[in-house]
Image (cartoon, helix red, strand yellow):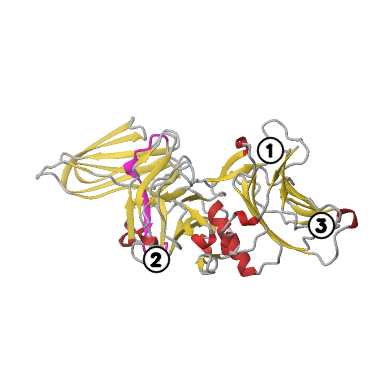
């Protein structure tokens, strides 16, 4: 066993959330062993797999009758009651686990409620806030222990192969009982920094609300953000929600491997905070929302801006599309849809449609140069969708005009569909159906009419298919989805 000595909180000139007088503040990698360094929301964190590491805390903490303690940690399996840290000193002992706070010397046990999130695809990340107020003196058998130390993770080497004790990213202790408004400022700082959703309003270091859960109740799920708040010591340049399976990431200018390596710049008190409606990242059954020719996903997000210059921030957005798109999906059919009104109606006159710069082979769509709240309303709604029409025009003055081209139902539940075509005059047509890799599946021809109704069935696997309509002068395309 070895000890690391933590001398004083005065090593830090600033304070979390702008709340001063913290007695202990540990963040990032607490240990000198670089192999213990991990990452949580692009910030350094400490692996709790090293069972022999302890930190000696300042020697003025023997009593600890009153304290407010914040801990940010992550466990691969939150359903199990796993140790986060244990402190020993003149006050006795105190242990925090994923399910309880416990003290043998103080004869105290406080069990947490089940989170109900054991099935999440991501490891669960938690902000634990513990307020300790003991009126009695410390246990007699502990009074003579003038040294205080803290140990993170499991205290017995019981891990099986491939298991992990998880991460701890930040530990903050005040030897006073903080007020609720002070706690809100610290928890908001931690939530934005580590992509953790709070069950309360988010506030900046001045106590001003930057996300109101009641007002934005529909979108108060999987909240994440970027922001700079000098008084709060926050400078988060890129972020993702620790609980969302879609891995939506938004960052300044160009997303980097870590927050510290992002070279973008933010101004003090500028925030971008976003949350979603907790729906599935699948196409909505609404086949043609408000005539926009875009199939939107059921999952939608809200972006809230605050700060004097937040509207000028240029961001990069990346999202994992594997659950929505087939491998090799043409990027010109996929788009980010921003409802600038912030209402979430996605009326075409309020929307901006942006095609990705690229979709990587593993399904990550990237959008660059995205600015938010360009109309000054304070918020944008946004989602993703598939364009049902992409037209390639061939110049021919004598070509018939296409008056209508529809494919329905879309999505089709059993592969059966209908195509209707209306032209300005009788025209021969050809219809080709391709899979997403542009392999030809079927060809249909018809001639001598101005109006066509062509039924069909896709006898192939679930996925996205491209239907191309060829006339003598023009080519028109639509996407059809078979779930």
| SS label for mark 1 | loop
Q: Secondary structure at mark 2?
A: loop
Category of crowding for the residue at label 3, using alpha-carbon neighbours closer than 10 angstroms: few (below 14), some (14–19), many (at least 20):
many
Task: Work out how far the residue at label 3 is from the one at label 2, CA to CA, in angstroms.
Answer: 47 Å
- Classify 426 as above or below 137: above
Start-end of magenta stretch: 327-344
Residue 96 vs residue 384: left or right?
right
Quarter-of-image position of residue 178:
bottom right
Tell me, yes or no, if residue 293 can be seen here: no
Residue 308 image label: 2
Provide residue 241's location: percent of width, then percent of height: 53, 51
Q: Which residue is most to the right?
A: 140
* Residue 71 is inside the magenta segment: no
Residue situated in front as seen by the camera: 78 or 425: 78
Label 1: how many residues lie within 10 Å, few (<14), some (14-19) or many (20+)? some
Local crowd size for mark 2, using a 10 Å CA cut-off: few (<14), some (14–19), many (≥20): few
């Amino acid at each position: 066993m070895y000890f690391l000595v933590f001398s004083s909180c005065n090593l830090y000139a600033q304070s979390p959330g702008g709340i001063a007088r913290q007695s202990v503040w540990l963040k990032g990698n607490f240990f000198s062993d670089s192999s213990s360094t991990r990452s949580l929301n692009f910030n350094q964190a400490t692996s709790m797999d090293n069972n022999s590491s302890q930190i000696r805390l300042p020697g003025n903490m023997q009593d600890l009758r009153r304290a407010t303690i914040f801990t940010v940690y992550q466990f691969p399996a939150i359903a199990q009651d796993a140790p986060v840290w244990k402190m020993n000193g003149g006050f006795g002992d105190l242990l925090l686990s994923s399910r309880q706070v416990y003290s043998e010397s103080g004869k105290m046990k406080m069990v947490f409620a089940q989170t109900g999130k054991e099935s999440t695809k991501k490891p669960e990340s938690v902000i634990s806030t513990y307020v300790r107020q003991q009126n009695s003196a410390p246990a007699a058998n502990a009074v003579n222990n003038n040294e205080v130390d803290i140990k993170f993770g499991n205290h017995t080497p019981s891990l099986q192969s491939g298991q992990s004790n998880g991460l701890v990213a930040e530990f903050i202790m005040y030897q006073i009982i903080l007020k609720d408004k002070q706690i809100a400022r610290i928890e908001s700082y931690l939530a934005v920094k580590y992509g953790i959703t709070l069950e309360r309003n988010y506030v900046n270091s001045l106590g001003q609300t930057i996300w109101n859960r009641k007002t934005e109740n529909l979108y108060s799920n999987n909240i994440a953000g970027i922001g700079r708040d000098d008084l709060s010591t926050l400078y988060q340049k890129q972020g993702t929600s620790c609980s969302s399976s879609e891995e939506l990431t938004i960052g300044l200018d160009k997303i980097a491997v870590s927050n510290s390596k992002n070279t973008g710049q933010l101004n003090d008190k500028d925030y971008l905070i976003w949350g979603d409606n907790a729906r599935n990242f699948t196409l909505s059954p609404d086949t043609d929302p408000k005539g926009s020719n875009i199939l939107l996903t059921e999952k939608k997000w809200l972006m809230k801006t605050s700060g004097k210059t937040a509207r000028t921030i240029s961001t990069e957005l990346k999202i994992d599309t594997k659950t929505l798109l087939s491998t090799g999906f043409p990027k010109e059919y996929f788009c980010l849809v921003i409802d600038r009104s912030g209402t979430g109606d996605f009326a075409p006159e309020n929307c901006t449609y942006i095609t990705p710069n690229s979709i990587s082979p593993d399904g990550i769509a990237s959008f660059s140069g995205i600015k938010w709240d360009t109309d000054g309303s304070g918020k944008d709604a946004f989602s993703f969708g598939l364009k049902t029409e992409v037209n390639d025009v061939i110049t021919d003055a004598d070509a018939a005009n296409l008056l209508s081209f529809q494919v329905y139902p879309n999505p089709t539940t059993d592969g059966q569909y209908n195509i209707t075509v209306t032209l300005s005059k009788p025209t021969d047509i050809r219809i080709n159906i391709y899979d997403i890799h542009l392999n030809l599946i079927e060809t249909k021809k018809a001639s001598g009419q101005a109006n066509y109704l062509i039924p069909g069935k896709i006898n192939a696997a679930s996925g996205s298919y491209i239907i191309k309509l060829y006339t003598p002068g023009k080519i028109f395309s639509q996407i059809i989805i078979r779930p």
